């Protein structure tokens, strides 16, 4: 997905689902539940101005370390490559 271009139109939802699945497997609290995992009260924090209202959304990863987000990206890449290899090797003409 170089420069934001998707080779397969409409794949965004599937990649997001995979991203959250892997984050859950790694035990990473993401989204709105991520704020509550750290004891943050979303309403109180937005009233105080500590967290802008516009930044509190489902896809919040700001509290996750770069190392952990990289692990999610690496796991996504590994899983996509494994799925592509399984698909490729299951084709009849490849096994000859």
Image (cartoon, rainbow, N blue to C red):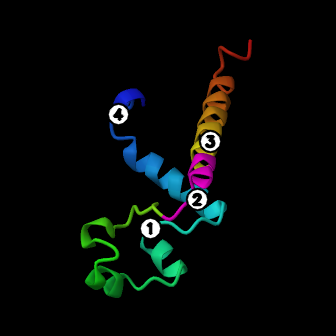
Q: Is residue 59 left or right of residue 70?
A: left
Position of the N terminus by quadrant: top left
Residue toward you, 90 or 14: 14
Task: Give the image quarter of residue 47.
Answer: bottom left
Per the model, the C-alpha gap separating discs 3 and 4 is: 18 Å
The answer to whether one can see residue 45 in this image is: yes
Q: CA distance from mark 1 to mark 3?
A: 20 Å
Residue where numbered disc 1 is placed: 31
Tag 3's secondary structure?
helix
The answer to which of marks 4 and 1 sits earlier in the sequence is 4
Name the dominant secondary structure of the magenta segment: helix
Residue at the location (67% across, 32% down)? Answer: 86
- Is there a contact, CB below 8 Å, between mark 1 and mark 2? no
How far apart in space, not on screen, are marks 2 and 4 (Cα)? Answer: 22 Å
Specify which label sits upstream in the sequence, 1 or 2: 2
Q: Which mark is residue 23?
A: 2
Asked if the residue under mark 2 is in contact with the one under mark 3, i.e. CB atoms within 8 Å, the reply is no
Q: Which mark is residue 4?
A: 4
Question: Is mark 3 in CB contact (under 8 Å) with mark 4?
Answer: no
Where disc 4 sits, the SS reads helix
Q: Which residues are magenta?
A: 63-71
Most distant residue in the right direction: 96
Between 21 and 95, the one nearer to me in the picture: 21
The image quadrant where one finds the C terminus is top right
Q: Residue at x 73, y 17 (%)?
A: 95
């Amino acid at each position: 997905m170089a420069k934001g271009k998707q080779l397969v139109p409409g794949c965004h939802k599937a990649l997001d689902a995979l991203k959250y699945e892997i984050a859950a497997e790694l035990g990473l609290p993401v989204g709105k539940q991520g704020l509550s995992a750290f004891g943050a009260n979303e309403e109180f924090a937005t009233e105080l101005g500590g967290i802008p209202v516009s930044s509190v959304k489902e896809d919040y990863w700001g509290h996750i370390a770069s190392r952990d987000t990289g692990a999610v990206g690496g796991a996504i890449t590994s899983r996509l490559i494994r799925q592509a290899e399984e698909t490729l090797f299951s084709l009849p003409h490849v096994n000859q």
